[in-house]
Image (tube, rainbow, N blue to C red):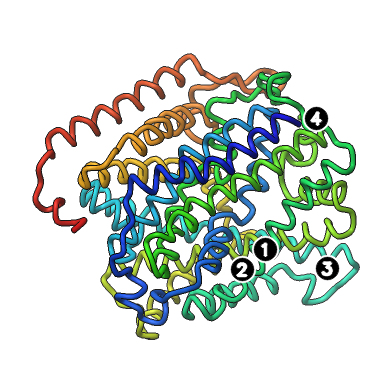
């Protein structure tokens, strides 16, 4: 239990100490923000700081710090270390700079930011990459809740239209269209803070239940080993699995939404760094619950951290109230991440094709195809005609690869701004090693060719190849970065970007 409390204290302290260092490195000032300068009444408008924080938290969180952290508990309490240090030195840094770089570039989407600092080729790659990723996220976060709602009605003995997955999917997609089309204050600004509060209460209730009902959180120093029941390597599977609870590239697609609504740059520490630290705390609580309530085998039997495990944790720690909160969480949280995923996709396309979004016609032109593709994928999946689960399995890897790219972009930003670029280059190098190593080990990636299967179906991972290649690739990326900044030591175009 002391391990948990120490990690919790480090996260809280990290917000003030290292978060302060990150903020000082960036150097927020009193310049006019995009929310004030542009203010189109749709995507650019000033929102209160507390709303900015709550919306950002729910945008980046959803079910990420719950499902990912519970799955991470399969490796034992060693996961606490990644959640804690990953959040402080990588995830919160990533979120802060993705939001503040957008702030300094008229609220631009992450694809446009990547193009500014990493070149035109990367911009085009990131445009396509971001739109595809966001539509996939939005679609899955429509199909999943629709299936859960259908299951609740079916298990309750209901029949007819309310027992139809298609019916609930259609309602969710209609809501997505409205939330994507309307100005950010109409729906997102009103309901997100409420769901954000529910997410926090849910985590606090679980933490209180662990302490008051006699569960014991195992200590890191007594269990400093790989406890995964299937022997899955810690490096780099745990770092990919936890994702949103430590660092997530998906957050970089969401931060520009709030960058367009801030009254002052000085709000960035609380809104971006603070929201990620809060998500890290939520993830730490859920990881602790997974370690305290179950053995690895028991957690794996519950699906390894899915909705079944969430229900069980809430039931054991909070009783009937917990079940109600769990129901709300596993249905509402993905929906609130899904609608902002589609909204972000609209904004990426708007930046791509230089289409202002104050006009309802321009918003409609982008909303229809974006939601249309989501509807085709979702309805096709619900009818059993389209199986995109294989594609979705790549999300965990592409998510962390996106984080890696954003951190390298932030490093270039800091170089051009004559600031300490090591604050982002170090986590960028680390995430490069994580991403490349997983690409070589994951069975949905090159692992299907490099790994071997035993007679009983277990996987023997080819770490002898993946580990050194991942490290060499990370060093190579760092070398390319250092070589590039040496060549570009003086470039007038970039000198003017930050004035």
Q: Earlier in the sequence, mark 3 or mark 2?
A: 3
Q: Residue at x 59, y 77 (%)?
A: 174
Q: Which residue is mark 2?
A: 193
Q: Which residue is mark 4?
A: 295
Residue mark closest to the camera, 2 vs 4: 2
User: Extreme bottom residue here?
Assistant: 360
Q: Are the residues tagged 2 and 1 within 8 Å (C-beta)?
A: yes
Determine the CA span between mark 2 and mark 4. Answer: 35 Å
Report which quarter residue 474 is drawn in. Answer: top left
**80 is higher (above) or lower (below) than 357:** above
Residue mark closest to the camera, 4 vs 3: 4
Q: Are the residues tagged 4 and 3 within 8 Å (C-beta)?
A: no
Residue mark closest to the camera, 3 vs 2: 2
Residue mark closest to the camera, 1 vs 3: 1
Q: Which mark is residue 153?
A: 3
Q: Which residue is mark 1?
A: 197
Determine the CA span between mark 1 and mark 3. Answer: 26 Å
Determine the CA span between mark 1 and mark 4. Answer: 30 Å
Q: Disc 2 on helix, strand or loop?
A: helix
Q: Nearer the viewer, residue 219 or 155?
A: 219
Circle 2 packing at 10 Å, graded few (<14), some (14-19), many (20+), is: many
């Amino acid at each position: 239990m002391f391990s948990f409390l120490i990690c919790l204290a480090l996260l809280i302290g990290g917000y003030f100490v290292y978060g302060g260092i990150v903020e000082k490195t960036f150097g927020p000032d009193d310049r006019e923000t995009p929310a004030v300068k542009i203010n189109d009444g749709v995507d650019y408008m000033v929102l209160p700081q507390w709303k900015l924080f709550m919306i950002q938290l729910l945008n980046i969180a959803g079910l990420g710090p719950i499902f990912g952290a519970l799955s991470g508990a399969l490796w034992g309490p060693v996961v606490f270390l990644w959640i804690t240090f990953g959040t402080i030195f990588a995830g919160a840094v990533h979120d802060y700079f993705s939001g503040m770089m957008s702030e300094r570039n008229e609220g631009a989407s992450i694809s446009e930011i990547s193009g500014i600092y990493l070149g035109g080729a990367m911009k085009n790659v990131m445009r396509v990459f971001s739109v595809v990723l966001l539509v996939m996220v939005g679609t899955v976060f429509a199909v999943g809740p629709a299936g859960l709602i259908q299951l609740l009605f079916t298990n309750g003995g209901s029949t007819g239209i309310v027992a139809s997955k298609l019916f609930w999917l259609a309602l969710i997609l209609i809501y997505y269209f409205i939330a994507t089309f309307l100005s950010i204050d109409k729906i997102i600004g009103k309901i997100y803070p409420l769901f954000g509060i529910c997410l926090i209460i849910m985590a606090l209730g679980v933490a209180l239940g662990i302490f008051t009902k006699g569960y014991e959180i195992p200590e890191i120093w007594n269990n400093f080993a790989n406890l995964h029941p299937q022997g899955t390597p810690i490096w780099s599977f745990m770092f990919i699995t936890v994702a949103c609870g430590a660092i997530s590239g998906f957050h970089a697609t969401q931060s520009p939404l709030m960058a367009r609504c801030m009254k002052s740059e000085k709000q960035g520490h609380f809104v971006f760094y603070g929201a990620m630290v809060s998500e890290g705390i939520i993830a730490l609580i859920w990881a602790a619950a997974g370690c305290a309530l179950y053995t690895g085998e028991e957690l794996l039997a519950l699906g390894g951290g899915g909705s079944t495990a969430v229900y069980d944790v809430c039931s054991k720690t909070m009783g009937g109230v917990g079940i109600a909160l769990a129901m709300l969480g596993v249905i509402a949280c993905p929906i609130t991440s899904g609608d902002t995923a589609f909204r972000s996709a609209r904004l990426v396309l708007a930046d791509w094709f230089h289409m202002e979004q104050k006009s309802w016609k321009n918003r409609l032109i982008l909303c229809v195809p974006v939601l249309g593709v989501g509807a085709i994928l979702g309805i096709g999946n619900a009818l059993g005609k389209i199986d995109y689960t294989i594609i979705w399995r790549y999300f965990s890897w592409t998510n962390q690869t996106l984080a890696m790219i954003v951190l390298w972009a932030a490093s270039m930003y800091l170089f051009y701004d004559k600031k300490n670029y090591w604050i982002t280059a170090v986590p960028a190098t680390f995430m490069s090693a994580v991403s490349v190593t997983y690409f070589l080990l994951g069975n949905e990636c090159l692992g299907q060719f490099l790994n071997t299967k035993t007679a009983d179906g277990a996987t023997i991972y080819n770490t002898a190849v993946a580990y050194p290649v991942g490290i060499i690739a990370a060093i190579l990326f760092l070398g390319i970065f250092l070589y590039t900044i040496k060549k570009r030591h003086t470039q007038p175009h970039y000198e003017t970007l930050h004035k």
